[in-house]
């Protein structure tokens, strides 16, 4: 009986963990990305703003235009 209770407890916990993982995944998808400007993105990557502009022109980094400025999703920038 005691072993059965423990198995049931573990099954319940496993189901809760799955539900929490799914909720975290949904929240991550719903959370807007943090966009940073050219200077902050260049600093994060450890390159000059001029180099980052070249990378933008070459299509090497993801970016968005906001008006006339460039914005970069911080989560997608991988430092060297």
Image: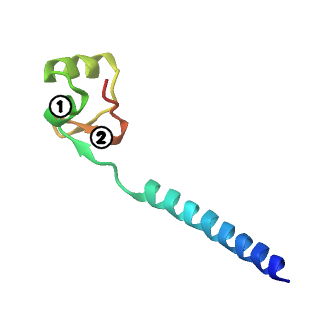
In this rendering, would 62 be left or right of 23? left
Q: Residue furthest front?
A: 2
Name the residue that disc number 1 marks.
43
Horizontal and vertical percent position of residue 40: 17, 36
The circle on residue 27 is none
Q: Residue furthest bottom?
A: 1
Count residues near mark 1 (Cα–Cα under 10 Å), then give few for <14, some for 14-19, many for 20+.
Answer: few
Name the residue that disc number 2 marks.
74
Q: Residue at x 33, y 49 (%)?
A: 33
Q: Nearer the viewer, residue 40 or 7?
A: 7
Position of residue 43 relative to residue 24, above or below, is: above
Occupied quadrant, residue 47: top left
Horizontal and vertical percent position of residue 36: 21, 41
Q: Residue at x 56, y 60 (%)?
A: 21
Q: Residue at x 31, y 40 (%)?
A: 73
Report helix, strand or loop for mark 2: helix
Position of residue 78 relative to residue 33, above or below, is: above
Number of disc labels: 2
Report helix, strand or loop for mark 1: helix
Q: CA distance from mark 1 to mark 2?
A: 11 Å
Horizontal and vertical percent position of residue 37: 17, 38
Q: Nearer the viewer, residue 8 or 60?
A: 8
Mark 1–mark 2 CB contact (< 8 Å): no
Count residues near mark 2 (Cα–Cα under 10 Å), then give few for <14, some for 14-19, many for 20+.
Answer: some
Occupied quadrant, residue 57: top left
Occupied quadrant, residue 66: top left
Q: Residue at x 78, y 80 (%)?
A: 5
């Amino acid at each position: 009986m005691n072993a059965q209770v423990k198995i049931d407890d573990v099954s319940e916990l496993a189901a809760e963990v799955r539900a929490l993982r799914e909720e975290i995944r949904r929240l991550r998808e719903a959370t807007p990305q943090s966009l940073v400007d050219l200077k902050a993105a260049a600093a994060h990557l450890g390159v000059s703003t001029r180099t980052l502009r070249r990378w933008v022109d070459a299509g090497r980094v993801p970016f968005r235009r906001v008006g006339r400025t460039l914005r970069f999703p911080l989560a997608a920038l991988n430092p060297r």
